[in-house]
Image: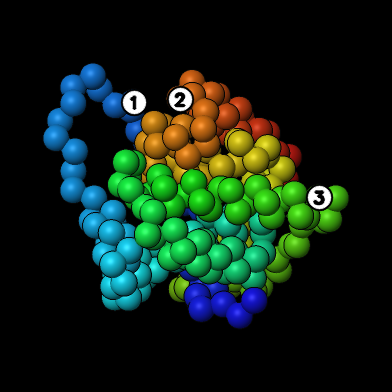
Amino acid sequence: MTTMFSASAATTFPAWLGAHAEKAPAEDATPKPARDEDAELMMAVAKGDEKALAELIRKWQGPLINFFYRSLSSVEAAEDLTQLVFVRLYRAAHSYQPVARFSTYLFHIARRLLINEFRRRQRKPLETMDPADLRAVDHSSGRDQQRLFEMEEAFQQALVKLTEDQRTAILLLKQQELSYEEIAEIMHQSVAAVKTHIFRGRQKLKEILSKMM
């Protein structure tokens, strides 16, 4: 499939893994919900507004490529699936109802496509990526840059060893910065189950990385 996205968005070093504090569960208080500009854009897409679709693509192509790349270790597959998300989004625009945040709706589509891709790839080895192919901008010494590549490769190899639930929950929390409640809705699981996936996934990542680094 010919892609319309830049591969560079998929190769950012995962500093987010430990850089952000976890989001606390929503409090009992029910403040007025914030305006969801993306949902408004989606409603405009339903009316045939091509500029609204272009704006959604501009905003979400990077996060989607990152999400797919971290799960599949393939820039090409990440770009193809990202394009497919927007195709499905466009086709479903006429029936879209903003009952949840747009990001929840978007990553629900993305996860379904990811699961389908895993099924298609059953028993097929995951593609690996040569760290030399990374396009991250780095102005440090050659030794530091090589170390960065090695860490990136080790992290990616560890990430794909998690279960799909663990990997998806961690990526949605740390990479996409979604709340536990949003992740639970995307994964059709309870908040408690999501927290368990994240806890076990982190423990497994630490265990794997400690043996590799």
Which amino acid does the dot numbered 3 rest on? Answer: Gln
Residue 48, picture quadrant: bottom left
Residue 145 in sight from this viewpoint = no
Check the image and report above or below for 60 versus 165.
Answer: below
Q: Position of residue 73 (x, y in %)?
A: 67, 59
Q: Which residue is mark 1?
A: 25
Q: Which residue is mark 2?
A: 191
Contact between marks 2 and 1 (CB within 8 A): the answer is yes
Question: Which residue is rendered at x = 33% and y = 28% of the image?
Answer: 24
Q: Is residue 134 left or right of residue 17?
A: right
Q: Which residue is at the front of the view, 191 or 99? A: 99
Contact between marks 1 and 3 (CB within 8 A): the answer is no
Q: Which residue is mark 3?
A: 122
Mark on residue 113?
A: none
Q: Which residue is at the front of the view, 90 or 174? A: 90
Q: Position of residue 125 (x, y in %)?
A: 82, 56
Closest to the camera, between mark 2 and mark 1, is 2
